Amino acid sequence: MSERLSQVAARIRGIRELGAVVNAMRGIAGARARQAREALRAVELYAASLSGAIGQALALLPPDGVVAPVRGRALILFMAEQGFAGAFNERLLEALPPASDGVELFVVGTRGASLAQERGIRPVWSGAMPAHPDSIPRLADRIATQLYARIASGAIGRLDALFARTATDIERRHLFPLDPKSFAAAPSRNAPLLDLPPAALLADLTADYIHAQLCDAALHAFAAENDARMAAMAAAHREIGRQLAQLEMTQRIVRQDEITAEIIELAAGEAAQG
């Protein structure tokens, strides 16, 4: 019986150690999600200022000066970098267009890219999601480098991003080409002073705006992944609590059985001596 009691005690220690790991993972995920949302406010303000500048630049061009023919299409898919995020990746994969649509796929997130390949989805490019929100702009630089090379070659004429705004809310956002109707010029009494031709200015502003949109999508995805991980860890914490309660009850029963067996043994020995 003492051997069984030691086994139960060992399982309790193991469950408690697992609980400490789960709590630590939940705390780290919560901190990262909070940092990503704090960074989002700055990116949104930056994107809004660029949007106003693009509206002013568009007003300086002829109406047909910004129309570009749509050739190939590409989709940037922001998935999870690590595991323990529940069905986060599965929901994103379910939102993908059919493979027959001929959309070139760019995947961000090591774990998500592996799952996509297991399902026969082959991206033309994949990269890791940074471990900290401060590194998101460098990720956007890497994505933009790949995209601009393909846009310049004519392989891509339309670009969208698919990402999770929350752990359960999936958004598909159009990035390129710009829709002039989406950029209203702010009313101004004075015309802007330009050092560049309007077309060159618009091209530079467009590059900056797409970079800001990539940062925005990546930060939303980063926060949503960690929200999903917090939810998964909360569910694991509840299950650990349930199992721990059962094991502690089993431990009390086994200890009581041992005590009862010892008392019976002592009583039997006393009776035999009498």
Image (tube, rainbow, N blue to C red):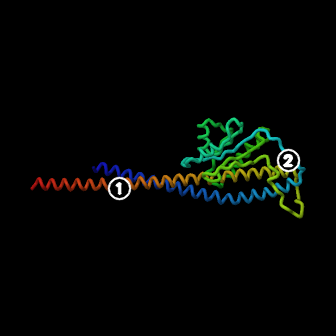
Mark 2 = which residue?
Answer: 66
Residue 71 position by quadrant: top right
Tell me if mark 2 has few (under 14), some (14-19) or many (20+) residues whose alpha carbon lies within 10 angstroms of its own.
some
Q: Position of residue 196 (x, y in %)?
A: 88, 53
The residue labelled by disc 1 is 249
| Residue at position x 78%, y 41% in the image | 157
Front-most of residues 17 and 181: 181
- CA–CA distance in space, label 1 to label 2: 72 Å
Q: Residue at x 49, y 52 (%)?
A: 236
* Type of the residue with mark 2: Val
**Residue 52: where, in percent of width, then height?**
81, 58
Amino acid type, residue under disc 1 in the picture: Met
Which residue is pictured at 23% across the width and 53% down the height? Answer: 261
Q: Is residue 52 above or below residue 172?
A: below
Q: Secondary structure at mark 2?
A: loop
The first of marks 1 and 2 along the sequence is: 2
Q: Nearer the viewer, residue 202 or 74?
A: 74
- In the rendered image, the quadrant that contains the C terminus is bottom left
CB atoms at circles 1 and 2 under 8 Å apart? Answer: no
For label 1, the SS is helix
Which residue reaches farthest left?
274
Q: Residue at x 51, y 53 (%)?
A: 233
Toward the viewer: 187 or 266? 187
- Along the horizontal axis of the image, is 200 left or right of 123? right
Q: Residues within 10 Å of mark 1 (few under 14, many from 20)?
A: few
Percent of width and height locating residue 118: 59, 37
Which quadrant holds residue 244?
A: bottom left
